[in-house]
Image: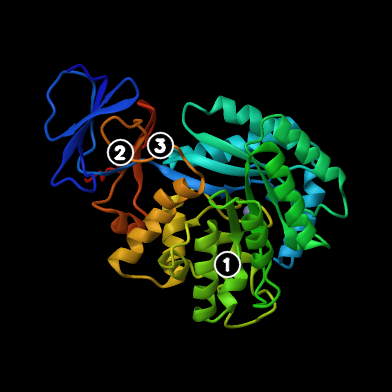
Amino acid sequence: MAFDTIIANVRLPGHDGLVDLAIAAGRIAAIAPDLPGDMPRWDAGGALAFPGFADSHVHLDKACILDRCAICEGTLTEAIQQTAAAKAGFTTENVYARAKTVLEKAILHGTNRMRSFVEVDPRAGTRSFEALTALRQDYAFAVDLDICAFAQEGLTQEMATYDMLDACLGQGAQMVGGCPYADPDPERHIALIFDLAQKHGTDVDFHLDFDLDPTGSAIPAVLRETEARRYGGRVSIGHVSKLSAMAPEEVSRIARRLADAGVALTVLPATDLFLMGRGQDRLVPRGMAPARILHEEGVVTTVATNNVLNPFTPYGDASLARMANLFANVAQISREGDLAAAFAMVTDEAARLMRVPEYGIAVGGVADVVLIDAPDAASAVREVAPVLAGWKAGHQTFERPRARLIQG
Ligand SMILES: [Zn+2]
């Protein structure tokens, strides 16, 4: 049988020992040990093969703006204000250049699916949306980029934003996102974002409950709208740091409601750790939603990058292996199964949240393959294992050879 390429000597869950992956016409044509043939061969040397990282929550439009902002307090309010001032000066070319830097890093860290928010409002105009639309096309060879037109600065007090979101959805934005905590009328904000989603038939994603007060959650409003509009499976919420201030029994109760309604949740460790608990001068709370409990109660739970090098998160390299490790460290998990779940939060679970139509390495399936230098998923998280190479629909998209010791 003729294959285009063989990725030789990979570890693959469900298979004993090392196997070869044969690729033909962009699909996995065979999985077996020692496949014969003289087609091009890439020796994985025992690395773990998986379908690639999926980053379910990134802001490419406002990445890499530390040179335009000052961070004095390190609070959410300051981050929103600083970014609002900076984005008035964004040009399409500038957004494209900064977003490209982060997207290329993500690809080189093994990410081949991403959901990026893009702020659309009277200050940003539609310039950032236009930049990401061009980027999406230019990098389609390596990454499936979903663009979420996003109201970061409220809606009901500035309905011009609503019309601009509507226009972007009409021009190809894959989905719509809201931020009720930044709106004077959070419940109406949620309803309006759902209106836009329904009008355009898209999924919906909310930045939600981003503080440490256990009261006043917007989750009931999101659940109500999700159920009333029969939108289960198409709704996700991010941050939800209020959950970190609640008793575990209360978190479990809410988690069961989210799972039943089909609302997924994304934890954003880097931003939550940086912005939360600024009022305290010691024993600073972690402020990270207890993802392990949510996952165990059946909520589709993911971990994602959020921001890179801006006032929300002045760090970042777009590596999801590193983010899964940060999450695991902060969540104080150590068991094999919990670490494997952390890996799933940046792979399978994220693909579920993003409703990726095909995800998994199987004969007949699309040949999206990333190699990571670890024996299994839990080890990849423990060690922040480096990725070595990736293929998208059968075409190799990057290579990152193993580091080599030079002696003498
Ligand atoms: Zn975000």
Residue pictured at 64% horizontal, 78% vertical: 214
Q: Is residue 60 above or below residue 313?
A: above
Which quarter of the picture shows residue 228? bottom right
Instruction: Indicate which label's residue lies in the foreground, 1 or 3.
Output: 3
- The percent position of residue 263, horizontal first and vertical second, equals 55, 57
- Specify the label residue 273 is tagged with: 1
Indicate the amino acid at tag 3. Answer: Glu
Q: Can residue 239 be seen in this view?
A: yes
* Badge number at residue 361: 2
Taking depth in this image into account, of 334 and 398 the one nearest to the observer is 334
Q: Residue 358 carries which label?
A: 3
Contact? badges 1 and 2 (CB < 8 Å): no
Front residue of 278/148: it is: 148
Q: CB at mark 2 closer than 8 A to ligand 1?
A: no
Disc 2 marks a residue whose amino acid type is Ile
Q: Where is residue 407 in the image (x, y as percent from the top left)?
A: 22, 46
